[in-house]
Amino acid sequence: MTDEKEKIEIGGVTIYEGDLTELLDDPENPNEGKVYGEKVLRSSINKTGLGRGVLVDKDDRLVAGNKARAAAVNEGFTKAIVIETDGNTMVVTKRRDMDLKDEDPDNIARMASYFDNQAALEGISFDPDVLRANLNRGMSFEEIFQDWQITEILSDADGAEAPDGFEEFDEDTDTDYCCPKCGYEWAGKAK
């Protein structure tokens, strides 16, 4: 991503322009994501613009922000400012168009705060196969998960199959309703 780009060195970090489409997905991303979480992310981007960044490794592979980057690209954003650090400098995004003190009921700063937290809450669905593979590699998750959480995630891998004749969901499936808690979408009439 750094080929022939103008770089600026400041305070021990390197800054240059990049392209979101050149970032590499994490093939072992532990978050499978949820339909409703993606919907919240895309709404956030459409209503408040981009705010948070993503984290990549030294080879531009996404460590954190896989779903956010995908949503941004899907909404037509490709420009990125890359800031190379060693992990000892917090990167802060300052939005000149945001003011948390603004009393306007459509305040995009306040709205962005809610979108950010709701997207985090509704967008996470740990992939039990990825977790199991990392546990088998000897990774320790004691500072990340409680034991019962690991048990719960791994038990999701043994979930039930959809019944025969159940229509598979994709982006082209028409839906009438969306559960605000889990993001499950369905069509039909309420009983």
Image: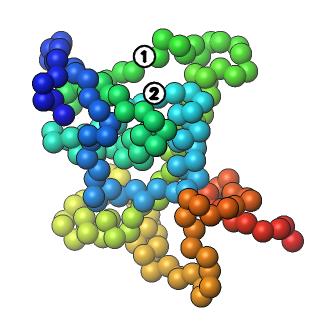
Q: Residue flagged by tag 2: what amino acid is it?
A: Gly
Q: Position of residue 79 (x, y in %)?
A: 35, 28
Q: Residue flagged by tag 1: what amino acid is it?
A: Lys
Vertical position of residue 182 compared to residue 163: above or below:
above
Query: Quarter-wise, where is residue 72 in the image?
Result: top left
Q: Position of residue 69 (x, y in %)?
A: 39, 41
Crowding near the residue tagged with mark 1, few <14, some 14–19, many ≥20 C-alpha atoms within 10 Å: few
| The N terminus lies in quadrant | top left
Residue at 34% from the left image edge and 70% from the top image edge: 129
Residue 68 appears in the rendering: no
Q: Mark 1 highlights which residue?
A: 94
Sequence-earlier tag: 1 or 2: 2
Residue 54 appears in the rendering: yes
**Residue at the right extreme of this rendering:** 191
Residue at 57% from the left image edge and 33% from the top image edge: 46
Front residue of this view, candidates 140 and 26: 26
The circle drawn on residue 21 is none
| Number of dots carrying numbers | 2
SS assignment at label 1: loop
Crowding near the residue tagged with mark 2, few <14, some 14–19, many ≥20 C-alpha atoms within 10 Å: some
| The C terminus lies in quadrant | bottom right
Query: Quarter-wise, where is residue 154 in the image?
Result: bottom left
The circle drawn on residue 51 is 2
Residue at 15% from the left image edge and 39% from the top image edge: 58
Vertical position of residue 158 compared to residue 39: above or below:
below
> Is 162 placed left or right of 140 in the picture?
right
> Is 102 placed left or right of 91 in the picture?
right
Please report contact status of discs 1 and 2: CB closer than 8 Å, yes or no. no
Q: Position of residue 61 (x, y in %)?
A: 23, 45
SS assignment at label 2: loop
Real-space CA distance between mark 1 and mark 2, rounded to the nearest whole angstrom = 8 Å
> Is 122 placed left or right of 156 in the picture?
right
